[in-house]
């Protein structure tokens, strides 16, 4: 199914810029922290292929560190599960769950 729509293109542009900034921070360009908190809309609001590409890009960025600990954090809040191979360690470090106080983002109910 083709991906269409002005809103989707705009969202893709914004996310691409965010990822470019994260990548630049990892490479030591600029003064931005290598941290990205992506509070996603509901999965029905964005095409699934966009989420898959976001997760795969973050994976590729992490794999570039080889055996070293990655020098960035990427937190995604979404109801959409990542691709199966990325839903476990070392890529998935924590799964948030608002029904469990111990699994709240930063331990806080906002």
Image (cartoon, grey):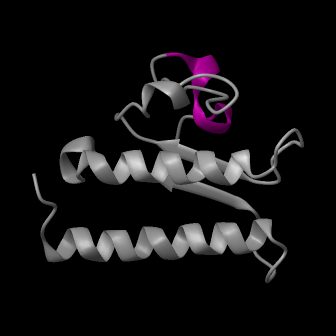
**Residue 21's quadrant in the figure?**
bottom right
Q: Which residue is pictured at 66% across the width and 31% down the height?
A: 107
Is residue 30 inside the magenta stretch? no
Pick whichever, 98 or 78, lies toward us. Answer: 78
Q: Which residue is pictured at 54% across the width and 54% down the height?
A: 57
Is residue 59 shown above or below 32? above
Is residue 107 inside the magenta stretch? yes
Q: Which residue is pictured at 67% across the width and 23% down the height?
A: 89
Q: Residue 71 in the image: x percent, y percent?
A: 83, 53
Asked if residue 40 can be seen in this view, the reply is no
Pick whichever, 100 or 8, lies toward us. Answer: 8
Pick whichever, 106 or 86, lies toward us. Answer: 86
Q: Residue 104 in the image: x percent, y percent?
A: 58, 29
Hey, which residue is sitting farthest bottom in the picture?
30
Is residue 40 shown above or below 8? above
Asked if residue 43 can be seen in this view, the reply is yes
Is residue 28 shown above or below 87? below
> Quick check: 60 left or right of 11?
right
**Residue 22's quadrant in the figure?**
bottom right
Q: Which residues are magenta?
A: 100-108
User: Please, what is the dominant secondary structure of the magenta stretch?
Assistant: helix
> Quick check: 19 left or right of 44?
right
**Residue 44's quadrant in the figure?**
top left
Q: Which residue is pictured at 75% across the width and 75% down the height?
A: 32
Is residue 90 shown above or below 52? above
Pick whichever, 104 or 51, lies toward us. Answer: 51
> Quick check: 60 left or right of 56?
right
Q: Residue 53 in the image: x percent, y percent?
A: 42, 52
Number of callouts: 0
């Amino acid at each position: 199914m083709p991906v269409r729509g002005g809103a989707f293109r705009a969202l893709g542009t914004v996310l691409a810029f965010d990822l470019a900034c994260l990548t630049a921070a990892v490479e030591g360009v600029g003064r931005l922290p290598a941290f990205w908190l992506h509070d996603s809309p509901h999965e029905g609001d964005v095409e699934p292929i966009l989420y898959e590409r976001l997760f795969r890009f973050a994976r590729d960025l992490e794999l570039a560190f080889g055996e070293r600990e990655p020098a960035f954090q990427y937190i995604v809040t979404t109801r959409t599960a990542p691709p199966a191979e990325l839903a476990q360690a070392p890529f998935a470090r924590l799964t948030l769950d608002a029904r469990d106080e111990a699994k709240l983002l930063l331990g806080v109910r906002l």
